[in-house]
Amino acid sequence: MDLCCCAPCKPRYRRLVDDIYLRSGTDGLHKSNMQKLTFYVLSQPEKLDRIGEYILLRLSRDLYRQRYTQVKVSVEAMDQLLQSCHVLSSLNQFIESFLKMLQKLLETNNLAMEKLATDSFVNFANIEESTPAYHREYDFFIAKFAAMCFSNDSKDARAIRYAGLKGLRGVVWKSATDPLQVSIWEKQHMCKIIPAILLNLEDNDDREEKDEGHGDEQPSPFTQSFASGIAESPKALSDQFLRELMEKAPFGLISVIEPVLSHCDSHGKWKPPANFATHVFGAIMFSIKDPSFVIQALINHLETKSNSDASIRIGIATVLSSIVSRANACIGPSLLGIFNSLLKHLRQSVEFRHSKECPSIKAEEDYQNTLINAMGYYANALPDYQKVDIMMLIVESIPKISGTYPNLTAAEMYLRSVLVKTLLRVATKYKTAYFSAVFTDSFLKTLLQLAVINEPSVRLNTQSIFHTLLDRHDNLSLLAHLPCLTDVDNQPLIHRCSRADQIFMRSHITSFTHMLYKNVFLSPEDSTLSEHIDAALCTMALLCVEARCDEVLVELLRLVFALQSAALESVFNTHKRILVHSLVSKYLNFSSLLMAVPSVYQYVQRVLKQRTHLGASALNILSASRETTEVTRFGRREVHDEALEKQCLRKLVDDPSLTFNRNDFAEMLKASGKDVQRLSLPFASKGRGINVDGVENSSDNTQNALLKIRQNNVDESTFLIDTSFETSPPGSRTTSRRNTILSNFENENNLPYLTVDSLRKALNSSSDLAEKERIEKEKTVRVVERFRKKDFDYLVKEVERVNERADLSTAIKRLLQKSDENIITEQPKSIFEVNFPCALVE
């Protein structure tokens, strides 16, 4: 019997799909029928793409008829099939139908459908596919999810933005984990994703709700890492998404930073205090693979804003100072490049400050201080050896310091002051281990020159640099304003000095003492005088503590007695002389405690007690009050009784018992076994002032002689060292056989020849590198000036005269002439006129 039916025949896969929909239309997915469909797909994988197309067809029909329950069933079925069949080779075609389904859901602009599509796409993003997909693109989803993040609907804005962020996060996760996908890191995609993240990151809705609920504050981005799981609010999710995005970004990718910079520019996020920009870049620095790349990008952006308002540049510099401490892994060229860039911007700001176009000097100074702080924070995050390199780099950037270049513009002088502040900021982050490691020849020379230039603020900052570099045992808080100590057993002041530091200080202590002598002379006689005197005293105390060897102590004593002599000889004004005497008293009291020589300590205390009868409070350091002050409506200021101070100074000059005696010190130290031979040498030539341009005062007689020769414009090469041998006895008439063949010129300037004693003194004396360098420079200048100003004929004759003296033929001719003059012209005696000795005559 034949059977027939009027209904059209459906393929099996369609009947299985139809069975998962319940006829009531109000219930969900039929689970048992869904299991049959899944088993069918696994047994016949080639039918998977057709099943996907058919489900998409039904979903489109249900969407048109607004049967949203059936739509949810279709989406759930597609999700389950995707989860169960992700290992099949035919999955790619099914995914195309799946993405078309999500696209249709997102195009409805219905919040429930958009959330349903977003959740489905997030589940799809977590699936690992076994087959590559070369043609798949997510441009529509990026654009749609980004648009959802910008929703302004007052009723459902938070939900829509949250769904958009989840969708973008899924797109990034899916694209970043699959290297065969179209690159998500292209600029066109990042310009949509990152602004969407930043817009939700600055949303204030969460903060308002938190304030209403009295919740705890959100932790700072600098102290938290990635959040676990999914955040519950758009603000928290955007922060988590930003961190994940930067973590997945390839090394040194500029396309992820440029949108952040553009967003801060267009929305005015650089204006101080720039909290939002600081938060964003803090999160980026904690997440990105190359932190130094972010800093360099910010510096480059700062360069593009060089002509912008100062508030914008201050905001960028503030962000830099907040995040540079994270870039502790950058080394080599990146380190020097970053610091060179910061110094370049600092120099440009200084030049702009002194130009007529600068609208606000105060704003430019704030910008410069912010850059200085940024460099200080950056240096603090680096190892010590890199801090030394940075300090050398700053020193090389300081404009002309030497006295050879006295004419500096106002901008150059101000730049020098700013760079010294920068150097001080970096130096405070450095911990000195060995003096020779940080005080290299060029670095020490520059600091010594900066300490004696004609700018008081620079000199004071340079002393602060010496303080922080010399202080290795955290004694600066005690020695910054040195009190009158009576005991050092309870103070951490006694430390052992290494042999390397002793060798270094033996070679350079004279440079330090000469610098301190000049620095005290140059201290301005104004309200800042006490600060300069205290700074010099602190440097002396630190040298005494950190380099405890006999040579250093003796040189510092020479300096102290030289300052006392200058204060007694009325070189300074009245109040400055009083403060210098106070400096001498405090240092000798301090050093006598460290030397632990009872006779020296008793002698110092005896002199100090005798000074207690004087009226000036600065001379009475044993009293409890350091100085007399009065309170005015402008604050506290020093009160000086000039008549009383003059009376005290006259007593110091008239009564030797009120001053410290060099000879008494030398005898007591010699009795204790110390070498005090150099203590009797004069520290500086009397009657000479202080040359601000860098002329050093000598400490030895030989150096004083050279200094006088330089004053008379005499070349140092005229000093002749006699290396010939005198074989004739002192009263002999025989001509001395000196080496006069190739050098027959006389000492035209009647200068004294160097003797063995003077050479011995020169060898035993400490070398002064700054003095040697200055002598070489002056000699070069004299040679250049000679050839510039002297007549050409004169120079030709001078060269001919020198060549004639050194010519061998001329020398032989001169020798023969001298031999002819000594020919004996008398007749020789006969044998009968010769008197033979008695021993030869029989």
Image (cartoon, rainbow, N blue to C red):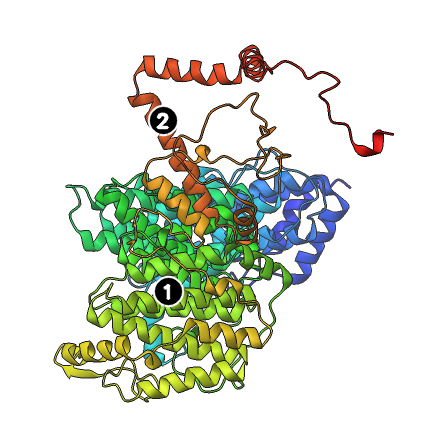
Horizontal side of residue 670 vs 206, given as left or right: right
Horizontal side of residue 757 vs 576, given as left or right: right
Vertically, is 406 above or below 538? above
Counting residues from the start of the chain, the first of labels 1 and 2 encountered is 1
- The residue under the point 42% across, 76% down is 588
Residue type at mark 1?
A: Ala
- The residue under the point 36% across, 52% down is 450
Horizontal side of residue 595 vs 348, given as left or right: right
Estimate the x, y position of residue 328 in percent, counting from the top left: 53, 55
Vertically, is 794 above or below 8? above
Residue type at mark 2?
A: Val
Vertically, is 366 above or below 558? above
Q: Which residue is more in the foreground, 726 or 228?
A: 726
Q: Using the numbered discs, state the Cα–Cα distance from disc 1 to disc 2 in whole angstroms.
A: 36 Å
Crowding around mark 1 (Cα neighbors within 10 Å: few <14, some 14 to 19, many 20+) is some
Circle 2 SS class: helix
Residue 131 visible in the picture:
yes
In this view, the residue farthest toward the left is 633
For the C terminus, the quadrant is: top right
* Mark 1 lies on residue: 562
Circle 1 SS class: helix
* Mark 2 lies on residue: 784
